[in-house]
Image (cartoon, rainbow, N blue to C red):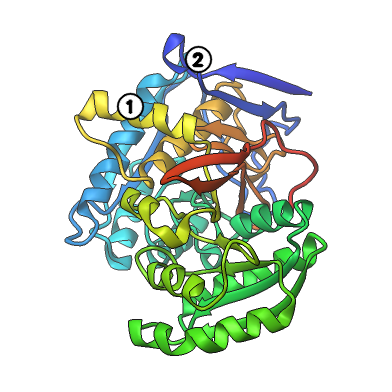
Amino acid sequence: MVAVFPLRRKVLTWITCIFAMLTLSACGFSLPGGGGPLINTQRAVPVALLVPKSSQSAGALGVALENAAWLAVNDLDDVEIDLRVYDTFGTPEGATRAASQALADGARIFIGPLFAQNASAVGQVAAGRGVNVLTFSNNPSVAAQNVFLLGSTFENTANRLVRYSVRQGRGRVFIVNADDPAEALGADAIRRATQRNGGQVVGSAVFPLSQQGVVNAIPEITRDYRASGAQSMFVTSGNSGALPFLSELLPENGVTPANSQLIGLQRLDIPSSALSLKGLQGAWFATPSPGLVQQFNNRYAAAYGNTPPPVAGLAYDGIAAVGALVAQGNSNALTTQALTQGAGFAGVNGLFRFMPDGTNERGLAVAQIRNNQVIVIDPAPRSFGGAGF
């Protein structure tokens, strides 16, 4: 049975948290997969937000995450969250100290931290007390029995894009990635998604991560692509990396929209100036529902006077999920079984749900860049079907 619970009066008519009614008993045993503490829903539930407010490189992100979390807390209806903010300083050591202090203060669940190494450190501290962690990271290597990812993973994005590509008759895939650990993980995610969704990887290419490396590799990449019989080219690089060079040089060397569908594993609309790149016109990528994101951005700007970075929405989503579960009034609302119920939640980035292995599934739209604009060509799902990937 599925129940729907609004988060707050008219303020959140555009967002609803969805979750399955749970049948856990109220006794205090530890559940498999990380368990979770029992809570008293008649009192404000202590929630620890871990953010890198004093980090030189990520302090601004920490502030934005805190702002978004408070926005979510203020939107909750009939749910009391005692949100306490702890500074991780952007380091594993700082995250460990923050987590230990939060547990001493009675935290029943963690939201954050941001970086993968910090999330792993917090997860270890929290595991000893049977507390779950909803980290902003998207790195599956830190997902664990009590650590759940809020960030969208390569696996999730690749699965969405490959599934759509296969439906469109573009299932013969050629993968291009830089010689970089993160991009190699992205390439592997595309391979798995292609196999999972009935496509075929017919070729691949790896290039050195430098401007000259791209220039030198282009002739071989384009030659191999044409010889492979591929219908689409997946590129793991983003606009902060090699993608602008690739998108410019590929058409000059014969790989054009007429014989190839360019598909980006990373967001092609960040920064927005990338939308005017000639080589990206016609390219596909996965994105949260633009309408929901814009509404959140507008609300955030009205409250704080600036546009939030994309990661800020994850803090809102984390609070929204906790609020939806606590609203049931069940003492076991923050256990692993509750967090991983199949119906998932709806946040400012669209539908999402936590998987038992600590990863997540997010309902993403497929978009195309046309005439320097983002056009949704396949909307994000309105509900989840089945058990996930």
Q: Is residue 101 above or below residue 154?
A: above
Query: Taking 226 as reference, is 253 left or right?
Result: left
Amino acid carrying mark 1 in the image: Asn
Q: Which mark is residue 298?
A: 1
* Image position, residue 171 (x, y; %): 76, 63
Residue lying at 33% horizontally and 24% vertically, measured from the top left: 299
Q: What residue did someone put label 2 on?
A: 13
Asked where in the image residue 141 lies, by quadrant, the reply is bottom right
As measured in the structure, the alpha-carbon distance from the residue carrying label 1 to the one carrying label 2 is: 15 Å
Query: Residue 169: where, in percent of width, then height?
Result: 78, 57
Q: Which mark is residue 87?
A: none
Neighbour tally class for label 2: few under 14, some 14-19, many 20 plus, Cα within 10 Å = few
Q: Name, please, the residue furthest toward the right.
A: 198
Query: Furthest-top residue in view?
Result: 10
Give the camera-side residue of 154 and 324.
154
Q: Above or below — where is 245 with respect to 90?
A: below
Q: Is residue 258 visible?
A: yes
Question: Is disc 1 surrounded by few (<14), some (14 to 19) or many (20+) residues within 10 Å?
Answer: some
Under mark 2, the amino acid is Thr
Q: Closest to the observer: 346 or 299?
A: 299
In this rendering, the answer to whether 277 lies above or below 237 is above
Callout 2: helix, strand or loop? loop
Up the image or down, 126 lies above or below 349; here it is below
